Image (cartoon, helix red, strand yellow):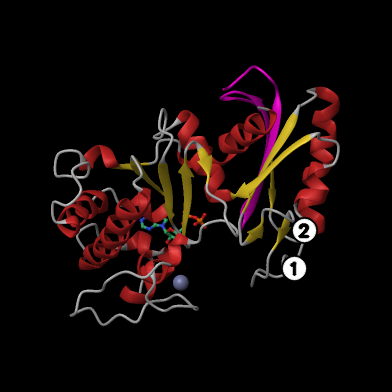
Amino acid sequence: MHSDTIVAGVELGGTKSIAVVGRGREIIDRFRVPTTTPDETLGAIAAKLAEWRQEHRPAAIGIASFGPISVTDGTMLPTPKPHWAGAGIVAPLAHGFDKVAFHTDVTGAALGEGAFGAGVGLSDFLYVTVGTGVGMGIIAGGRPVTGMMHPEAGHIRVRRRADDAFAGACPFHGDCLEGLVSGPAIAARTGGPAHLLLADHPAWGDVADALGEAFATLFLTLSPARIIVGGGVGLGQPQVLPMVRERVVAALGGYLGFVDAESIEDRIVPAALGDEAGPLGTLVMAQDALA
Ligand code: ADP
Ligand code: ZN
């Protein structure tokens, strides 16, 4: 699957964007810019891509972007992020490339983990980032799920403990999953930044409750072989995953033979590639576009 062909990739993030050119898992060159306006950010990246086309002749490009995006139109959908609503993403970056792939940043990271990280060898798995928001990339039959658009499973609702009165922090839904477990949600619940909370703070139990409910639902719905957890919150608090695993096993009540107390350590795992999942994922996307 991962040939020696040189390809390019772009990961647009909420605060910074990265372009890479590489081959398989090897990144030959990389370029970083702050994410400001579409003209400025995409313009700077397009200029770098033009240089790389001369120097490296990449055969395809994979573009992964913060969302919400339209994967069919190659544009940004309505978003509160200033300047970006409706912006064309694919057109300014794909110029000069014959083959182009376009997905969300979290789908890109899922593909990176699938090729080189915690999802190697799996055709059906989820990548969940818990950070400023909650995003999910769903890989089914070896391909990212894109129906109407990309999955927005960070906003599913979860059963709440009766004694938990926190209203949640999602501007759309209040106590959806993201409204309960994102960094800003934890800050709203506790009154201080998530990364400064002690590891044994009771809020981590609340986070584990919500993630446990959500993951149990996802195992029942999508039957993934593995759920890979990344993001600042997901990776920054290693004490939370064991609690999430316990919650999932309890919530499933012994119903799913493939998610039990023994197998759960292999079913829910931390991401392996950290910040490299995104950039490597864009190269995987480009390779897939060639196949
Ligand atoms: P983004 O989601 O913006 O791509 P991150 O995944 O790093 O970036 O998520 C940032 C969020 O994660 C912030 O809300 C921050 O408070 C939280 N965070 C970062 N590091 C930690 C940590 N070690 N423990 C808990 N929360 C953290
Ligand atoms: Zn929501």
Q: Amino acid at mark 1?
A: His
Amino acid under disc 2? Pro
Q: Is residue 90 magenta?
A: no
What element does badge 2 sit on? helix
Location of the N terminus by quadrant is top right
Magenta region: 1-28
Q: CA distance from mark 1 to mark 2?
A: 7 Å
Looking at the rendering, in which quadrant would you find the C terminus?
top right
Asked if disc 1 and disc 2 are in contact, CB closer than 8 Å, the reply is: yes
Q: Position of residue 35 (x, y in %)?
A: 69, 56
Rendering coords of residue 60 (x, y %): 74, 32
* Label located before the other in sequence (1 or 2): 2
Q: Is residue 19 magenta?
A: yes
Q: Is residue 94 left or right of residue 173?
A: right
Evaluate whether residue 182 shows in this view.
yes
Within 10 Å of disc 2 (Cα), the crowding (few <14, some 14-19, many 20+) is: some
Q: Percent from the top left, x then y, of residue 172?
A: 49, 78
Q: Badge 1 is on which residue?
A: 83
Residue at coordinates 56% horizontally, 25% vertically from top-left? 25
Q: Which residue is mark 2?
A: 38
